[in-house]
Image: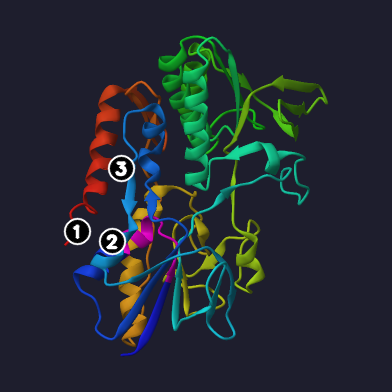
């Protein structure tokens, strides 16, 4: 058929789509995957990896073997822009790549701006460690673990900015791991600008996690806006203009996600955070030759949180619509579920289950989450 399908990013949706494509590829279609890493992380198991429950291998998908299985050409490079007039992807270290159809699944990065303005928080980019990209975060985390291990007598103070599910789960799993490494000489602060944690979940879940944090000795600072980040401290301001300065050795940034600036600069229609607006078919509303899934996409008819569960569910309809547009068939809509079960690990092989107005904490939920996560990763093992 002599069609060129180019994928940018090895996120959850693309990983599943590549597996399905490899089982039944379309002859004559040239498939290329562009990724800046060979090992793509599975977000569901990363907090457990931080806590030491999973190895690096157990939490990462090998894009080399997956690409071979899907008969795709893997290019290790970073995308820096799109030329949609000429259907080209601009790369950091290679010549532009031509495409007939393009699909993006590149995730998101934590926001380092003040609220919804475009004013950058001084020092955030220089001194804060963002939770994404994951390889950068994991590298910083391993360096911290080594430093803690090499200096057991030294007290350490960490600050985590962001009181959503990601920030809370990271704080609890970090504390669990560091406590095993160094005992009680670790101090952790969690800063959140809202008046309660996990605003997207029910009240019981929010309050329960706040109690667990405090019981573990994690200092919780609500209704605080970060105003500046320095090499050895962080400054905040409350709604009453009361200044707060916390001395710390590391600052981890886990705030509301945003998209790379080159997405909006490419001419694709985006939402206010720069995410690609897509139809129910997962096509760009402005460029039908472009698909998007996972965190980088916002469905115009269904407002859903940036959660891995939706990225996983989009993989199958995404690859089906690739096939349909290539073969000239009518594309099919994808309708995401309204509610979803969130399993939030608390770093002690227990988890909180959050579903609509329901919430409960138990070790059974952690083992259920472990089963689901391992089942997902098993899809990408022993690919022939």
Check the picture and name the quadrant holding the C terminus. Answer: bottom left
Residue in the foreground of this view, choosing between 272 and 78: 78
Q: Residue at x 24, y 41 (%)?
A: 374
Quarter of the rendering containing residue 64? bottom left
Residue 331 in picture, x, y percent from top left = 36, 78
Label 3 or label 1, whichever comes before in sequence order: 3
Label 2 or label 1, whichever comes before in sequence order: 2
The correct choice, above or below, for 355 with respect to 327 in the image is: above
Q: Residue at x 70, y 20 (%)?
A: 247
Magenta stretch holds residue 10: yes
Magenta stretch holds residue 336: no
What is the distance, in whole Å, between disc 3 and disc 1 at their CAs? 15 Å
Q: Residue at x 19, y 59 (%)?
A: 383
- According to the picture, the residue beneath numbered tag 3 turns out to be 57
Q: Sort mark 2 into few (<14), some (14-19) or many (20+) by Cα contacts within 10 Å.
A: many
Secondary structure of the residue carrying numbered label 3:
helix
Residue bounds of the magenta highlight: 7-17
What is the distance, in whole Å, between disc 2 and disc 1 at their CAs? 7 Å
From the viewer's perspective, tell me whether residue 105 is left or right of residue 235: left
- According to the picture, the residue beneath numbered tag 2 turns out to be 66
From the viewer's perspective, tell me whether residue 374 is left or right of residue 152: left
Q: Cβ–Cβ below 8 Å for labels 2 and 1?
A: yes
Q: Please tell me the numbered disc located at residue 383.
A: 1
């Amino acid at each position: 058929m002599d069609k060129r399908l180019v994928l940018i990013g090895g996120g959850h949706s693309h990983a599943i789509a590549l597996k399905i494509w490899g089982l039944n590829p379309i002859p004559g279609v040239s498939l290329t995957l562009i990724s800046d890493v060979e090992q793509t992380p599975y977000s569901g198991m990363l907090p457990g990896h931080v806590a030491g429950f999973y190895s690096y291998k157990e939490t990462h998908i090998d894009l080399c073997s997956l690409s071979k299985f899907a008969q795709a050409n893997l290019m290790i490079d970073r995308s820096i822009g799109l030329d949609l007039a000429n259907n080209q992807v601009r790369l950091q270290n290679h010549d532009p790549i031509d495409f007939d159809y393009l699909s993006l699944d590149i995730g998101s990065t934590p926001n380092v701006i003040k609220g919804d303005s475009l004013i950058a928080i001084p020092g955030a980019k220089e001194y804060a460690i963002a939770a994404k990209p994951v390889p950068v975060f994991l590298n910083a985390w391993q360096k911290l673990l080594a430093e803690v291990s090499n200096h057991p007598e030294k007290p350490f103070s960490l600050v985590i900015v962001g009181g959503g599910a990601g920030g809370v789960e990271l704080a609890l799993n970090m504390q669990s791991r560091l406590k095993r490494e160094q005992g009680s000489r670790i101090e952790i602060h969690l800063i959140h600008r809202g008046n309660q944690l996990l605003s997207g979940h029910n009240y019981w879940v929010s309050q329960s996690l706040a109690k667990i944090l405090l019981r573990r000795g994690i200092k919780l600072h609500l209704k605080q806006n970060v105003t500046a980040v320095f090499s050895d401290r962080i400054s905040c301001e409350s709604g009453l203009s009361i200044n707060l300065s916390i001395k710390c050795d590391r600052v981890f940034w886990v705030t509301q996600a945003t998209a790379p600036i080159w997405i909006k600069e490419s001419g694709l229609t985006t939402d206010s955070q720069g995410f690609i607006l897509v139809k129910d078919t997962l096509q760009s509303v402005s460029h039908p030759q472009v698909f998007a899934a996972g965190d980088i996409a916002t469905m115009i008819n269904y407002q859903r949180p940036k959660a891995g569960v939706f990225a996983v569910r989009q993989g199958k309809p995404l690859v089906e619509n690739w096939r349909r547009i290539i073969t000239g068939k009518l594309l099919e809509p994808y309708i995401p579920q309204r509610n979803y079960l969130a399993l939030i690990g608390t770093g002690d092989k227990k988890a909180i289950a959050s579903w609509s107005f329901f919430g409960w904490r138990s070790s059974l939920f952690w083992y259920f989450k472990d089963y689901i996560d391992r089942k997902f990763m098993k899809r990408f093992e022993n690919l022939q």
